[in-house]
Every structure is written in structure tokens, then in C-alpha cells.
Image: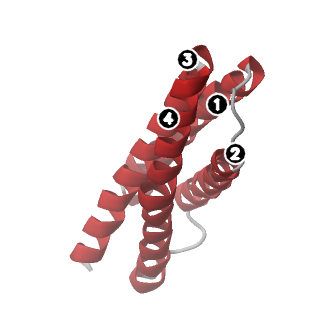
Amino acid sequence: MHYLKLLHILFAFCWLGTLLALTRLMGKLAKEPELVQERCKKMFARLYFFVDLPSMIITVGTGITLLVLKDVSMKEIWLHLKLTCVLLLVIVDIWMGGYIAAQKVPMTHARAVQYKIFHSFVALLLIGVLFSIYVLKAKSLA
């Protein structure tokens, strides 16, 4: 059980770190020349499909497994907040994957602003997950 939780946390770090990095870098890409944009977009696609997406799948899979094995009460408010934030993170991640897969050169300023908004939203959702685990869960156990 402890190894499963360790895998869950490890892949959550990989997933969210990659997602934060991708959203930030994609937001900065509009200022670069077209040749640099094309090279970076290929790198971003590899990063998304070979690091971000597998990490997300493993994180969600181990999270569901832990939820079933630990027999957590579904009435806990911290769990609802965490699951809502994770669901929104999955939606943003898949949305980002769609943008990365359908990239066109050159990137527009409006698309760069959209990535910066994604970056802020991901950061807020991460704070929501951490708040639910370390504040609300600790309160309910006390």
C-alpha cells in the first residue's frame, strides 16, 4: 500500500510539473521566430505524449486504486475538493494535448495568452489539491 502511494505521489509530481512547464513554455513561444516555434512544438509534443500523458494516466490509476483499497468515506469534504480539482486538471491536460497535437506555425498572440491562462488555472488547481489534503483532511482527522 505504501509503495502504491509513493508511486501516486511521484507520478503526480511528474504530471503536474510537466503540465506547468508546458503551459508556461507554450505561452512564451509566440515571441520566438517561426523556425524556433516549429522546433519547440515538436519537442513539446514529445514531452506531452511521452511524459505528461503517461504520468497523468498512472497518477489517476493509482489514485483510484488507493481510493478503493483504503475504503475512504465518500462523505469527506476534502475528498470532494481534491477529486473536483483533479477532474479539472485532467480536462485542462487533455485540452492542452489537443492544442499541442493540432499546432500550426506561427503561434498567435491570442493563443499565447490562452496558454498563460491555462498555466494560472493549473497552479490554482494544484493549490486546491494541496489545500484539500493538508488543511481540510488534517482538520477532519483532528
Amino acid under disc 4: Cys
Local crowd size for mark 4, using a 10 Å CA cut-off: few (<14), some (14–19), many (≥20): some
Mark 1 secondary-structure assignment: helix
Position of the N terminus, as image quadrant, is: bottom left
Mark 3 vs mark 4: which is more N-terminal? 3
Helix, strand or loop at label 4? It is helix
Earlier in the chain: of badge 4 and badge 1, it is 4
| 84 left or right, relative to 136 | right
Q: Which of the two discs, 3 and 2, labels the residue nearer the N terminus?
A: 3
Whole-angstrom CA distance, mark 3 to mark 2, is: 18 Å
- Is the C-beta separation of discs 1 and 2 under 8 Å? yes
Residues tagged 1 and 3 counted as in contact (Cβ below 8 A)? no
Q: Nearer the viewer, mark 1 or mark 2?
A: 2
Residue 115: x and y, percent? 64, 30
Residue 41 at x, y = what percent? 55, 39
User: Residue 32: which numbered mark, if any?
Assistant: 3
Q: Disc 4 to disc 1, how far (Cα)?
A: 15 Å
Q: At 50% across and 38% down in the image, what residue appears?
A: 22
The residue labelled by disc 2 is 99
Mark 4 or mark 1, whichever is nearer to me: 4
- Neighbor class of circle 1 (other Cα within 10 Å; few <14, some 14-19, many 20+) is many
Residue 55 in the image, given as x and y percentages of width and height: 42, 62
Q: Which residue is mark 4?
A: 40
Q: Which residue is mark 1?
A: 115
Q: Amino acid at mark 3?
A: Glu
